[in-house]
Image (spheres, grey):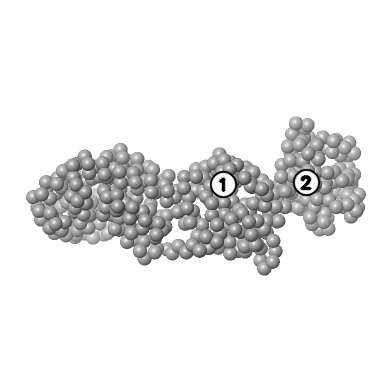
Amino acid sequence: MIKAVVVDDERLVRKGFISLIDWSSLGVVIVGEAGDGKSALELLQQQDVDLLFVDLTMPGISGFELIKLVRQRFAGIRCVVLTCHHEFDYVQEAMRLGAVDYIVKTLLEMENADETIRRLVDRIKWEDNTRDALVHGEGKRIAADKALLYLPLSSHCNEEELFHLSFVKNNPLITFHEMWMSPLLHRFSEEEGKRELKNQLSGRWQTALISGLRDQSLQELEEQLTTKLRHMLFYHSSAEELTFLNYEELKKEIAIPHLKPDEADLFVQAQNLKWTIDGNEWENFVTNILLQKPRQDRFLTFAHSLLQSWSSLLLKSEDAVQLERDISFNLNWCHWKTWLRRFSDHVGRRMLELGLTKEVMSCLIRAVRYMQSHAGDKINQSDVAAEINMSRGYFSQCFARFAGETFGECLRGMRLELAKSLLRETSLPVCEIASRSGFEDDRYFSRLFKERIGQHPSEYRAEGKDQ
């Protein structure tokens, strides 16, 4: 029970305040009362007290002085200000001196009195739990075996949302770098916890229940969580709101470097799209991802490159738009796997619509990639057909069906895209850009650019600089 004392120079106010509230039901017992600061200090010398309700305007030792003296002599006692509506100017000074809260006497009614004290008691218990969550030895250590972790999914998330959770009301909340943790000092029901987290935080926070924390160093724990948790959650999380982790497993995770040497190769090779047209290649692709565990941002880059390179050739416009929109909803590997499977299904349907075999489809994709990477070179249809081991005539026929335009038209489009990039990103003369984009005649290049893009190359460059 929390032991409390009420200090107010008006006897009827003291008695009315004490009788208004069902203290025992809130876990509080009134162990004394005093009519002035001097009597209150004498009472505190004789009686163990946890909580002091203090009126600010009293004769002799004022409420301000009493709060200051209590903080100096009885550090464990919390002081709560009892104030009238016209004394709000004094409250800030009382809080500065060490008061933890204030109650407006004129606003306290039968209907709200218990709830007002209940909130105060909950806060005191929460602060006590925060201290109890850490035990002292060589540095601070965790006193609980399990903890709930909260990671915001956007910059709009506010830690105040967490204070509505019963776990945070009844347990401490520790702040790390861009994440929060509640060591669970009291009973925790996983089923009830999952329901509450889903109702309160779903879609805005990523949550995990981590075990094996008892006696772990808080400093080491913060280092491990900061360097490894998000990456581990990315691959461990499913569509469920709560993920279960073990601290020993987390420590075994390798900290993620800026870029693993084989990570870039994984996504570069995946641009061949074999995983979209062959079931075995899909399984190999997924297996390699789980083995290498690329960083989350690499998936974002890969997805955008897929849509930029292949939307016009392999996707219907509405499908490409939907995939683009859905990228922002991919929060973990489970989501990304579903997104990549959808992209794969669209490519597979396109292959069936065109009536192409897997082998021919794969060759045409290789052809497009070769054309994109050599658009600035002097290549022609025969060069590309030879690169993918197809006869020129058959390649021409299949490519036109695949791209919806002739080889020449498609290559010119790629060269114009290359020219646009060079105009935006370099200060090279237009004639040099024409040459680097695969056009032998810069006048023809300028005329074609104006015809297709609607501006002369110099106008396009100037507009880009103005933006």
Question: Furthest residue to the bottom?
Answer: 138
Q: Where is residue 228 in the image (x, y as percent from the top left)?
A: 50, 60
Relative vertical location of residue 143 with respect to residue 90 in this rendering, above or below: below
Amino acid at the residue labelled 1: Asn
Quarter assignment of residue 53: top right
Please, what secondary structure does the residue beneath circle 1 have? Answer: loop
Q: Which residue is drawn at 63% across and 56% down?
A: 145
Tell me if I can see residue 460 in this picture. Answer: yes
Q: Residue at x 78, y 31 (%)?
A: 110
Question: According to the image, label 2 marks what residue?
Answer: 80
Question: Furthest residue to the front?
Answer: 280
Q: Position of residue 107 (x, y in %)?
A: 76, 34
Please, what secondary structure does the residue beneath circle 2 have? Answer: strand
* Residue placed most toward the observer, 282 or 142: 282
Is there a contact, CB below 8 Å, between mark 1 and mark 2?
A: no
Q: Position of residue 203 (x, y in %)?
A: 50, 43
Q: Residue at x 34, y 46 (%)?
A: 341
Relative vertical location of residue 72 with respect to residue 339 in this rendering, above or below: below
Tell me if I can see residue 441 in this picture. Answer: no
Quarter assignment of residue 131: bottom right
Q: Earlier in the sequence, mark 1 or mark 2?
A: 2
Measure how far apart labels 1 and 2 are at the Cα level: 27 Å
* Residue placed most toward the observer, 463 or 142: 142
Q: Where is residue 333 in the image (x, y as percent from the top left)?
A: 42, 51
Relative vertical location of residue 159 with respect to residue 231 in this rendering, above or below: above
Question: According to the image, label 1 marks what residue?
Answer: 158
